[in-house]
Amino acid sequence: MQLRNAMRARRVMTGAAVAAALVTMATLAAAQTGLPPLSSGGGADATAAPRQLPPILSAAPVPGPVKTGPDAPSPEAARGVLEPAAEAVISAEIAGRIVDLPVTEGADFAKGALLVRFDCTLYEAQLAQARAQAAGAKAALDNARSLAKLQSIGVLDVQLAEAKLAEASAAIRLSSATVERCRIEAPYAGRVVRRLAQPAEGVAAGDDLLAIVSDGLPRIRLIVPSTWLAWLVPGQPFDFAVDETGGTVKAQVTAIGARVDQVSQTVPVLAAIEGKPTDLLPGMSGTARFDPAARPAGPAEGEPVPQAKPQGAKPQGTPK
């Protein structure tokens, strides 16, 4: 019996030591993390207000310093790209074999310069055939008119001869138009973006041959928030920082899009570059920054905003 009581007393002492060690560890952990120490009374803690976690353990983001300086985002800044004033993909209007394609990628060309020439032997032969048929139809008509004066043939025969000549003349115009399409000339001065065909290749009507852009200064296309329509107007100046060159050019708004995108709530804006910079190419991108001081002045404080009059409304004081 004494041995049993001694063992029981030893277990109680060991449990108390373990509990004391756990309380000490909890106290140290609370001191390191900033948490209040755990209470031994379970009922009081169950109704207590939830404890605030330190910022490092909280799910909410810790507010950081606000970015300032020239690289800070601005509500008057928008991204844009440079695009040519005109661009086109030249395609074949006839089926044939390319015999001459003198321009290469990146090459300059003047307005009216030869871009592509096809083998036109077949189409030229068809034109010659149409001209010969027209000459025969003209001779037959002259003969029919002479016989009609002698009352050897009727009016119907003359009308049929005239129809034959008109048909031959239409064939000449058709063959001439086909022969003209054997040569493709530049619609404007510009540069070759890409060659999509090579000499000696046979192509079908509608196949792409060349991608070209117009020469001269490109224009700027911006995508701006639709809320800018409250102050953005044509003629408004801004600075455009080009990413590829690292330089900045002056530009001016020339046109504002006619429709707002319902999903992104943005509107396109076109602008012209001032001056004559020579290091700009279509496809470059950059950032447009508008000076808030350059915005058009609105109505003064306390002054009523003018409202548009409905159509058909009579001015006040006008007798009915």
Image (spheres, rainbow, N blue to C red):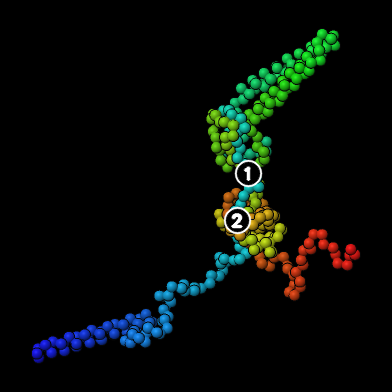
Which residue is rendered at x = 60% and y = 40% of the image? 89
Up-down relation of residue 143 to residue 117 (above or below): above
Percent of width and height locating residue 28 = 32, 83
Up-down relation of residue 31 to residue 301 (above or below): below
Q: Is residue 100 visible?
A: no
Question: Quick one: 263 or 73, which is closer to the camera?
Answer: 263
Dot 1: what SS? strand
User: Residue 99's quadrant in the figure?
Assistant: top right
- Cα–Cα gap, marks 1 and 2: 18 Å
Up-down relation of residue 317 to residue 170 (above or below): below
Read off the residue under disc 2: 80
Question: Quick one: 144 or 279, which is closer to the camera?
Answer: 144
The N terminus - image quarter:
bottom left
Read off the residue under disc 1: 87
Within-10-Å neighbours for mark 1: few <14, some 14–19, many 20+: some
Which residue is rendered at x = 49% and y = 74% of the image? 63
- Could you tell whether 47 is left or right of 223 in the image? left
Within-10-Å neighbours for mark 2: few <14, some 14–19, many 20+: many
Percent of width and height locating residue 21 = 25, 84
Which residue is rendered at x = 16% and y = 89% of the image? 9
Question: Quick one: 306 or 274, which is closer to the camera?
Answer: 306
> What label sits on residue 27 in the rendered view?
none
Up-down relation of residue 150 to residue 241 (above or below): above
Dot 2: what SS? strand
The C terminus - image quarter:
bottom right
User: Residue 195's quadrant in the figure?
Assistant: top right
- Could you tell whether 145 is left or right of 222 in the image? right
